[in-house]
Amino acid sequence: MTRILVTLGIILIVVGLAWPWLVKLGLGRLPGDIVIERENFRFYFPITTMVLASLVVSLIFWLFRK
């Protein structure tokens, strides 16, 4: 359990540090992400980005299990 938590912490740190470069790649504004902008309101629901992130994290955990 501690190995998983440490790995998850390291992944979160790396993603946090790499966020400025990930935004430039278009991550967070993929087709399928829902953005509703009104006068004093902005709603953002990144469906496609979350599916992609889930696949990447699942792949990483699968590789660590092997």
Image (cartoon, grey):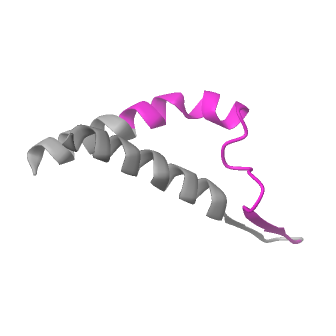
In which quarter of the view is residue 37 placed? bottom right
The image position of residue 53, as x and y in percent, is 51, 50
- Relative placement, left or right, of 35 versus 13 is right
Of residues 6 and 51, the one nearer the viewer is: 51
Q: Is residue 30 left or right of residue 58?
A: right
Residue furthest front in the image: 66
Measured as percent of width and height from the top left, residue 33 is found at 72, 61
**Residue 45, quarter of picture:** bottom right
* Residue 48 location, quadrant: bottom right
Q: Which residue is at 19% across, 46% downward?
A: 4
Quarter of the rendering occupied by the C terminus: top left
What is the span of residues highlighted in magenta in the rendered image? 13-38
Q: Is 47 placed above or below 61 here?
A: below
Query: Residue at the spot x=30%, y=34% of the render?
Result: 10
49 vs 57, left or right, is right
- In the rendered image, residue 33 lying in the magenta stretch gets the answer yes
Q: Is residue 62 magenta?
A: no
Q: Is residue 46 visible?
A: no
In the image, residue 15 sits, relative to residue 5, either above or below, namely above
Pinpoint residue 58: horizontal percent, then vertical percent: 38, 51
Q: Residue furthest left?
A: 2
In this picture, is 49 found above or below 22? below
In the picture as drawn, the residue positioned furthest to the right comes out as: 39
Please give left or right for residue 23 compared with residue 59 in the image.
right
Q: How many marks?
A: 0
Q: Where is 62 relative to 17, above or below?
A: below
Is residue 39 visible to the viewer in this orientation of the structure? yes
Question: Residue 16: x, y in percent?
Answer: 46, 36
Q: Viewer-proximal residue, 64 or 9?
A: 64
